[in-house]
Amino acid sequence: MKTRSTLFLLTFLFSIFIISSCQKPLDDADIRYLGSWGSDNYALEIWKDGRGVYEKRNKTDELECYVKIEDQMIKFRGGIHKNFDIDAEPYDDGTGQKIMILNGELFYKH
């Protein structure tokens, strides 16, 4: 009985470790990408804890997933695998509006 309880506990702890290791907070260098962004075709949300929301406009599905920013790409992972090439990092357009360019498309911060 004791070995069965120990085995269950070890399996449970290992599962927690695996799940938590998949989700990592974003680096401080990537804070400029945090928030809600929108373009004509997509709506994105990126949170500090490494999660985010990906939505293709004119679709009803909004998918919460993991976000990684690396190799000049924003990567959404979870139920989907969607990459956005970072063509221009977030910048101020001179009127106070934050803009970034992903896959050649303008994204405005909300």
Image (cartoon, grey):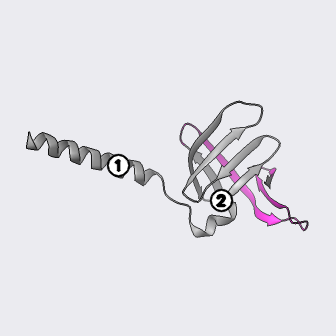
Res 108 quadrant in image = bottom right
Distance Cα–Cα, label 2 vs label 1: 30 Å
Residue 69, image x, y percentages: 60, 58
- In the foreground, 63 or 77: 63
Tell me the number on the disc at residue 63: none
- Residue where numbered disc 2 is placed: 72
Extent of the magenta region: 78-107
Tell me the number on the disc at residue 16: 1
User: For numbered disc 2, what is the local secondary structure?
Assistant: loop
User: For numbered disc 1, what is the local secondary structure?
Assistant: helix
Looking at the rendered structure, the kind of residue marked 1 is: Ile
**Label pair 2/1, CB-CB below 8 angstroms:** no
Residue 2, image x, y percentages: 9, 43
- Circle count: 2
Question: Of label 2 and label 1, which has the lower sequence position?
Answer: 1
Res 82 quadrant in image = top right
The correct choice, above or below, for 66 with respect to 72 in the image is above
